[in-house]
Amino acid sequence: MTKVDIAVVDYGMGNLRSVSKAIEHVAPNKTVVVTSNPEVIQQAERVVFPGQGAMPECMQELDARGLRDAVIDAAKTKPFLGICIGLQMLFERSEEGHVNGLGLFQGGVKKFNLDGARDELGEKLKVPHMGWNEVYQPKAGHAMWQDIPDGTRFYFVHSYYVQPDDAGCAVGYGQYPDQFTCAVTQDNIFAVQFHPEKSAHAGLQLLRNFVNWKP
Amino acid sequence: MLAKRIIPCLDVTGGRVVKGVNFVELRDAGDPVEIAKRYDDQGADELTFLDITATSDERDLILHIIEDVASQVFIPLTVGGGVREVEDVRRLLNAGADKVSINTTAVFNPQMVADATARFGSQCIVVAIDAKKVDDKPYKWEVFTHGGRKPTGLDAVEWAKKMVGLGAGELLVTSMDRDGTKIGFNNPLNRAISDAVEVPLIASGGVGNLQHLVDGIKDGGADAVLAASIFHYGEYTVKQAKEYMQQHQIEVRL
């Protein structure tokens, strides 16, 4: 088997082409594969765990392809980037379909309850939270935020957000209208709610940082 | 906080971008990939491609266009036009689309909207509504299909609510009275729909100057504004539009 630098986990949900194309764009010399083969994931140097759609279906499809163990193993052993539902699935449980996640982070996934909240123009806030929002970094910083200024806008599209039990794992916050966690880290895991592969220059910089990350 | 979005729209046929007036009189506006890259450079928040191809022979061209654009432009891409089955949605997503817009099929087979959202998630299903004013007192708008040629008898506001109920994650509302006229969005129409639903609304049809974009958000309650000709023919850049919106207290990504 040829050496795989970056494996993008494919469990049949969503647009993975954009993720792999964006990584290829920032790392033209790396081998990037979109795969549902647990062996390829095991042998890859780095793993990207994307996700789109609903978390119950994502968990179901992950298990249907026998990928759970390979994903958990990768998350514990090598640079690992979760994106969107790929962030949410790392937690213990989700309000969406009351499904259990992989439990790598303690805490749950909650639905936005905006209850008549309005923006600065007096317009009601919509769900999904869709579009470009500012991401605030905690003071300590993180190698994955290199060359990305505090408050940079990234592209979001989601109706649920993660609520870690331990706030110490949070490395990014958004506001809609209350503060919510949009990036977490733990050892070799970095996971984000927004879509770096759709966030223009800022997103490409984050992917570049991931390709170079030495946790 | 969340920025309001500017979405340049590219009408595509036969592999080229074109622009019509009131859905007819098409003029060539250029190569899709080049135009997409230019808008990305200018700071466009998303791009929408509408396949207005009349024949199925040419239909597959849009897949190649999306593949080409998606490998060079890293912002969200929405594709619409001729989407009939859940399988069409899958093919477009696999080609690199992030969202798929469903229009005529939603009217004739609403279940398809429900099936597509159940399979791929609400976040990637946009329902496009082409509406025309049928009454002034009080305002009333009717949904049209087939690129604005066929009346449906459906009330646009009620229809919007039904589509969101079936799972649509966003609405793209085009005023047929305004499309290509450059006299501004139909803000009463957009306001009526935006206030009636919980999902984001993209206003479309009628932009002639930058104040129209501001009005679309402030008066029409739109979460995003879509425009074609003011950008295609170089009257304004996306960046100029965003700076103008910011001067008018609208939050944008600059």
Image (cartoon, coloured by chain):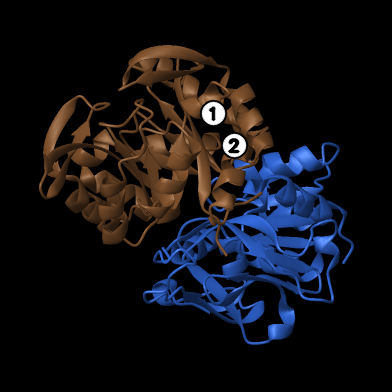
| Residue B121 seen in render | no
Q: Residues within 10 Å of mark 2 (few under 14, many from 20)?
A: many
Label 1: which residue? B231
Up/down of B48 relative to B65, above or below: below
Judge by depth and name the residue closer to the eye, B79 or B111. Answer: B79
Q: Residue at x 30, y 33 (%)?
A: B84
Where is residue B10 shown, x and y percent of the image? 48, 27
Foreground pick, B98 / A174:
A174
Chain A: give its colour.
blue
Q: Chain letter of disc 1?
A: B
Asked if residue B79 can be seen in this view, the reply is: yes
Disc 2 vs disc 1: Cβ atoms closer than 8 Å?
yes
Residue depicted at 75% across the width and 62% down the height: A80
Letter of the chain in brown? B
Sequence-earlier tag: 2 or 1: 1
> In this rendering, would B7 be left or right of B82?
right
